[in-house]
Structures are given as structure tokens and as C-alpha cells.
Amino acid sequence: MPLLSSDYRPPLHFRSGHLSTIYSGLFRKVDGLDQERERIELSDGDFMDVDWSFAKKPSKKVAILLHGLEGNAQRPYITGSAKAFNEAGVDACAVNFRGCSGETNRLYRSYHSGATEDLDAVVQHILHTKDYGEIYIKGVSLGGNMALKYVGEPRNIPKELKAVIAVSAPCKLYSSLKELLKPKNYPYAIRFRKHLVDKLRLKLPLFPDRISRSEIKAIKNLKDFDDIYTAPAHGFKDAIDYYEQCSCRQFLLEIQVPSLIINAENDSFLGPECYPYQEAEKNPNIHLETPKYGGHVGFIDSENRYYSEKRAIKFLEEVI
């Protein structure tokens, strides 16, 4: 334990993993959320923008929200989460990773699945400039891996950090990469590659000594991108080294903060190694829920409120 049973049952037509994934990514709209942007200056000279939204009454609780690959703080899975937390009396700090807020970041490096130094910068910023007694972290996809890695790494976890929620988390990055390269995921992989390469092209005139047009042209898939850009830009030997060092699964047994992982069985982005059953059985702080349905970040429920968003609020009530 804790391996959790799940009572999530979506509408019949959304029991397809692909349909729930596509609808949630392309068609879901979240209204009624006001966000205020704040820029955090980082110690290495770069910056990240975070978008705040607030509960109706002054709150001493805040949820840090982390998006997925090529996402941002305006994606519906983030705004839906922020709205759910705000309605539950919790402020929300939605992070835009480096280069994801609509403006190219200053350095050659950007963000990646294991960049917990950037998450720590947000946590420390909140601790030193705000007045919150409780902090929660909710990460989605890439952001879920980062959140779990953050609390499992050797570090002094602030006493204010009370819980983590990870949704559709690729706990073993290479396992997820292999799934994304399969024909079933070709449309998703092409879309990710296009967005990543478009951003990398913006760095070409800024860092002509670091990347060339021929190298960019050689990027045919996501692994190529990680070999040519992600790994060298962030200090890894190659893509495989990056995947091995940054996968959160190796850190799960060390987690001391109550942490909920919601990974759907029909998530086409997640390989078998992305479901950490053994770690959940051994570490009482890991609560693993594997619903039969949900696709990748597609936990559609009634009234445009997603199961994963409601489940996050319920989890906080259970463990705090």
C-alpha cells in the first residue's frame, strides 16, 4: 500500500484514451479565471514567468502548478487546476518554464523533465516573498515527473511543503520516449517535435556557436532533439543519460511528503515502467492510482471539472 482503487468512470465516448487526450488538449476551454503575471529572476541570469490566481478570500495556502512538454500556464489542464484550487480556497501559482511564457529565455539552456533547480527557485521565491503556511505542488506530465523528482532528491524539504500531486507522469522517461516513437503516437510526436524545433530556431541567431542549421535539420524525432539540444544544453552526455538521470522513479522510495500519482492505464504516452507499483507498495508516502481510463491528461468528468482536478483537492483533505 498505498495502491489505490479508482472510481473514475468517464462518459462512454471518452473511454478511448486517444479521444480523451485529443479533446482535452485541443478543445477544452476553461472560463472565469483571472491570472496575474510575475517575473522571477533566476540566479543564472535567466527568468521564469509565473501566473497567479487567487481564492475569493485571503488564503495561507498555495498550489504550484507545473505544465507538461511545450505547455504553459494557459493550457486548460493548468487553468482548470488553478480554478479548482481557487474554488477550494487555495491560491495558485502556475509556472511557465523557461521559454514557455511567450518570450524566448535569455540563455541557451531552457527547461527539461528534471530541472528541479527551477522548481526550487519558485518554491524559495514563494517562501521568501509571500506569506503562505502551506504549499502544494501539482505537476502534469513532464511537470509531474519534475515534482516527484524534486521531493525525492536529497534536499531539505521546506516544512511548508505538505503534498505533491502528479498527473500522467512519465516516471521512467526512456519508457515514455519509446512509446511516443511508436506509430500509434505519430501525430503527437510530430506536433511536439514541431513546437520544440520552432523554439530552437529562435536560439540560432542568439547562439550561433552552440547550434547550427544543419543540426536543427537533422532533428527527425524527439530522441534526436534530446541528443542534439536537450542533453548538451543541460550538461548530459546524450539523450539516454538525460533520461536516466532525470527519471523520477529512482527517487520515489526516498519521498517523505504525501504524494499522489494518477496514471491512466490507457495513457498511450506511458510505457510499462512508468507505473511504479513496487515503489508505492514499499513507500507509504506514495499513493498510486491507475484508473482504467483517462488517456494522457484526459480525465474528463461532468461540468468541465476533470476527475484529476477534483481528486487533487480530495487528496489534500485526506492527508493534511
Image: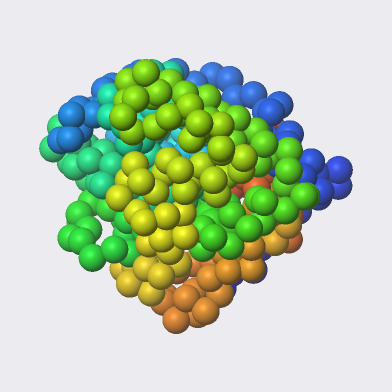
Q: Is residue 319 above or below residue 220?
A: below
Q: Quadrant of the C terminus?
A: bottom left
Name which quarter of the figure residue 293 lies in.
bottom right
Instruction: Say whether residue 308 is left or right of residue 66.
Output: right
Q: Nearer the viewer, residue 57 or 17?
A: 17
- Left or right: 55 as drawn, with respect to 171: left
Q: Please state the horizontal and vertical placement of residue 166, each as a whole percent of the image.
A: 48, 53
Residue depicted at x 33% and y 64% = 152
Residue 162 seen in this snapshot: yes
Number of on-image labels: 0
Task: Give the residue displayed 24% in from the left and 29% down from the top.
Answer: 46
Q: Residue at x 47, y 76 (%)?
A: 279
Residue shown at 53%/70% (left/top)? 276
Q: How is the image coloured?
A: rainbow
Image position, residue 63 (x, y; %): 37, 41
Residue 289 visible, this angle = no
- In the displayed structure, would residue 296 be above or below residue 152? above
Q: Residue furthest front?
A: 214
109, 65: nearer the viewer: 109
Where residue 38 sits in the image (x, y, percent)? 28, 22
Counting from the top left corner in percent of width and height, residue 71 is at: 51, 33
Query: In the rendered view, does 141 fall on the left or right side of 247?
Result: right
**Depth order, front residue of 202/294:** 202
